[in-house]
Amino acid sequence: MSEFAGAAPYYAAYRPGIPEAAVCLLRQTVASKQHPVLLDLGSGTGQVPAALHAAFAEIDVVERDPGMLAEADKALAGLHDTTVRLHNKPAEEFVPPHADWAADVVTVCRAFHWMDQPAVLSLLEGCTAKDASVVIMGDGSLWTARSAWTDALRALIQEYTGSERRAGKDKTYAAHDRPYREILAESAFADVEEHAIPIERPWTPQTVVGYLYSTSFAARPLFSDRLEEFEERALALLTEYADVGVLIEHASFDVLLARRP
C-alpha cells in the first residue's frame, strides 16, 4: 500500500506549490530549446507540471499512487498546447514513451527521499538529452520545520502516532543521511548548482490540518477512531499560536540543478 493512500484530495488542496523564483529558474534552462520535454518523477498531484507547463511542449508525469495520479490528471486536463502523458508507476520503472524520446529537464520535487536514488539517476543517463538538467528540489515539511508552533504540533502528533516519524500506516520513516549533492556527484549528473530560495509561508489552523492529512506522517488512517479528537486538539493548539488567525512558516526552498560535466 502507498504511504499516501487516501491522501490525494488533501494533497491537491493543501500542499504548497513551488515558488515563482524556482519556476523562473527552471524555465530559463529550456529558453533556447525548440521543443522542450519535461519528465516529472514522483509527481504527486502534478504541481510541478502545472507550474512549468508553459515552457514545455511535452510533459511526462510519473506517479506510483493512482489517487495522486488521478488528481494530477484533473489538474493538467486543460493544457491544450502541451502534450501530457501520465505514467502510473514508480520512478525506477519509468520507460520512455518512444525510442527517440529524451527529456530536457527532469524534476523531482519533495519526493527524492522515497526513491532508489542511484537507480533513478542511472536510468536517467539513458533517456535524457546530453545537455539535460536533473532538478532535485524541496523545502522540508511541517514535521522538520523548527518554530514554537511546529514543535508543539509535532509533539501532539507524536502523542497519537508514537515518537518515530511515520511513513503511512505500517511503516516508520527511514531518513537519508547523505546530502543529495553527494549522491548527484557520484552520478552522470555531477555538475551541480545550488539555489536556496527563502520562503515566508502563511497558514491558518484549518489549512495546516488539511496539509497534515496530505502527509505520510499524519495521514488520517494513523489516528484511527481518535481522528476527531486529534483534529479538535490540533485546531485548538494552532489557534492558540496563531497571530490574528495566521501562522507563519519560515523555510528554504532548495533547488539542486545537476548536469553532465
Image (cartoon, grey):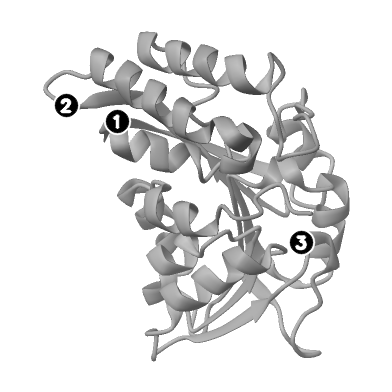
Q: Residues within 10 Å of mark 3 (few under 14, many from 20)?
A: many
For residue 136, side relative to residue 15 (left or right): right
Vertical arrangement, residue 76 with respect to residue 39, above or below: below
Of 244 and 27, nearer the camera is 244
Q: How far apart in space, not on screen, are marks 3 and 1 (Cα)?
A: 34 Å
Q: Residue at x 63, y 42 (%)?
A: 221
**Residues at badges 1 and 2 in contact (C-beta under 8 Å)?**
yes
Kind of residue at disc 2: Gly
The image quadrant that residue 81 belongs to is bottom left
Instruction: State the residue position of label 3.
Output: 91
Vertical arrangement, residue 199 with respect to residue 234, above or below: below
Q: Going from the N terminus, do you reach mark 1 or mark 2 first?
A: 1
Of 61 and 23, nearer the camera is 61
Q: Is residue 31 in view from this perspective?
A: no
Please tell me whether mark 3 sits on a helix, a strand or a loop.
helix
**Residues at badges 3 and 1 in contact (C-beta under 8 Å)?**
no
> Looking at the rendering, in which quadrant would you find the N terminus?
bottom right
